[in-house]
Image (cartoon, rainbow, N blue to C red):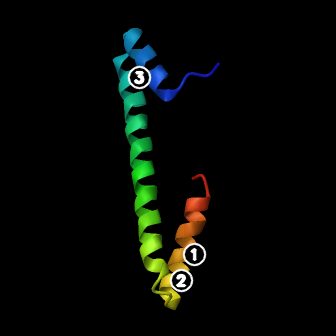
Amino acid sequence: MQLTIEEQERAAYAAGDTALATAWGRIIDLEQERIQLRQCIRDAADLIDWEKTDDHTQWHAGANKLLDSDA
């Protein structure tokens, strides 16, 4: 069974490996930032959708493609 990132962070702290625990904590922070940034893109795509100029349509299509990927 694979541990979650949070469980791995706690296990590293319990083992006294603060450097590894800090690294796991940073990964958690980055994952949360990724989620927030994807929400910003989603919000911007929703706002731009109604304008329908060529530039906006291309940006909207690109944003939706990014959101559809799991990157």
> Which one is in front, 23 or 57?
57
Find the distance from the CA under tag 2 to the CA under tag 1.
Answer: 6 Å
Q: How far separated are the C-alphas under marks 3 and 1?
A: 39 Å
* Dot 1: element: helix
Residue at 49% x, 28% y is: 5
Number of the label disc, if any, that sits on residue 20:
3
Dot label at residue 61: 1
Q: Which residue is mark 2?
A: 57
- Quadrant where the image shows the N terminus: top right
The image quadrant that residue 3 belongs to is top right
Q: At x 43% / y 36%, what residue is drawn? A: 27
Disc 2 to disc 1: CB gap under 8 Å: yes
Q: Amino acid at mark 1?
A: Ala
Q: Residues within 10 Å of mark 2 (few under 14, many from 20)?
A: some
Mark-to-mark CA distance, 2 and 3: 44 Å
Estimate the x, y position of residue 36 in percent, counting from the top left: 40, 52
Residue type (three-letter) at the residue carrying disc 3: Leu
Marks 2 and 3: which is nearer the front? Answer: 2
Report whether 69 appears left or right of 50: right
For the residues bearing labels 3 and 1, Cβ distance under 8 angstroms: no
Residue at image coords 37%, 39% = 29
Task: Please tell me whether residue 34 is drawn above or below residue 59 in the rendered image.
Answer: above
Q: Earlier in the sequence, mark 3 or mark 1?
A: 3
In the displayed structure image, the side of residue 18 where residue 63 appears, left or right: right
Residue 54 in the image: state x and y as whole percent: 52, 90
SS label for mark 3: helix
5 over 32 or under it: above or below: above
Is residue 67 depicted above or below 4 in this figure?
below
Q: Could you say which disc has been placed on residue 21 in the image? A: none
Q: Position of residue 11 (x, y in %)?
A: 45, 14
38 over 56 or under it: above or below: above
